[in-house]
Each structure stands twice: as C-alpha cells, then as structure tokens.
Image (spheres, rainbow, N blue to C red):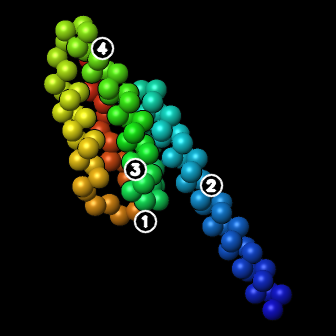
Amino acid sequence: MEQELLEFESTLMQEELAEQQRLETLCRFRIDLRKQGYSHIVPQFADMDEVREVREDVFKKVDVLVNIAEDAQKGAAPLRAYRQSLRDITEQSFDFSKPFNPFAPIPTLD
C-alpha cells in the first residue's frame, strides 16, 4: 500500500512538473509575440480558450499597427487581412495533445 502511494505521488509530481513546463513555454511564446510579432517557440495549448487568450494579445498589437498605418497613410490591407486570419483561427481544429503554433508572423509596416 505504501509503495502504491509513493508511486501515485511520484506520478502526480511528474504531471505537475510537465504542466509547469508547458505554462512556462506558453508564457515565453506570448512574450515573443508581444515584443517582436512572432515566435520560434512552439507551445502546447491546453484548449481553445488558451488559443483565444493569446489571440486577444495579438489582436491588440495588430489594432495599434492598423492605426499607425492609417495615420501614416500606409497600406493597412495586409494587417486587416492578418486580423481576419486571427478571427478564423477558432474555426480550425487542433490536436491539443501536441505542440503547435497557429499564429503566423505579424506583417510589418513598409
């Protein structure tokens, strides 16, 4: 009985460690997106709600870039198309058991 309890505790600790590592990777991914508009990190999302959370951050960044482009009278069409692709992300199906990156790099202003 004691051996089974030790094995259970060990398994639980391994699962907690794996979840902590997954969340740390997701945080680094989000920081990269905020800073540079893309990331080479491929995170593992737990569910579509996490994808939506990250997408909200990207929406905010793209909205600012659209305003900057319009103020500078530069073409905002690529940014608007990118914004539409962000909306379409939730219509895709993903295998949440594997890491993936559904976010293409944010277009830059010319």
Dot 4: what SS?
helix
- How crowded is the residue under tag 3: few (<14 C-alpha within 10 Å), some, or many (20+)? some
Identified at 33% across, 42% down, the residue is: 103
Residue on which the image places disc 3:
51
**Label 3 – label 2 distance at C-alpha:** 17 Å
Q: Amino acid at mark 1?
A: Ser
Dot 3: what SS?
helix
Asked if residue 59 lies left or right of residue 71, the reply is right
Identified at 60% across, 53% down, the residue is: 21
Q: Quadrant of the N terminus?
A: bottom right
Foreground mark, 1 or 4?
4
Circle nearer the N terminus (3, 1)? 3
The percent position of residue 54, horizontal first and vertical second, equals 42, 43
**Label 1 – label 4 distance at C-alpha:** 38 Å
Q: Amino acid at mark 3?
A: Val
Compared with residue 100, is residue 39 higher up or lower down, i.e. above or below? above
Q: Quadrant of the C terminus?
A: top left
Q: Are marks 2 and 1 in contact (CB under 8 Å)?
A: no
Dot 1: what SS?
loop
Residue on which the image places disc 2:
20
Circle nearer the N terminus (2, 4)? 2
Foreground mark, 3 or 1?
3
Asked if residue 91 lies left or right of residue 55, the reply is left
Q: Residue furthest right?
A: 2
Residue on which the image places disc 1:
97
Residue on which the image places disc 4:
68
Circle nearer the N terminus (4, 3)? 3
Residue 7 visible at all:
yes
Foreground mark, 3 or 2?
3
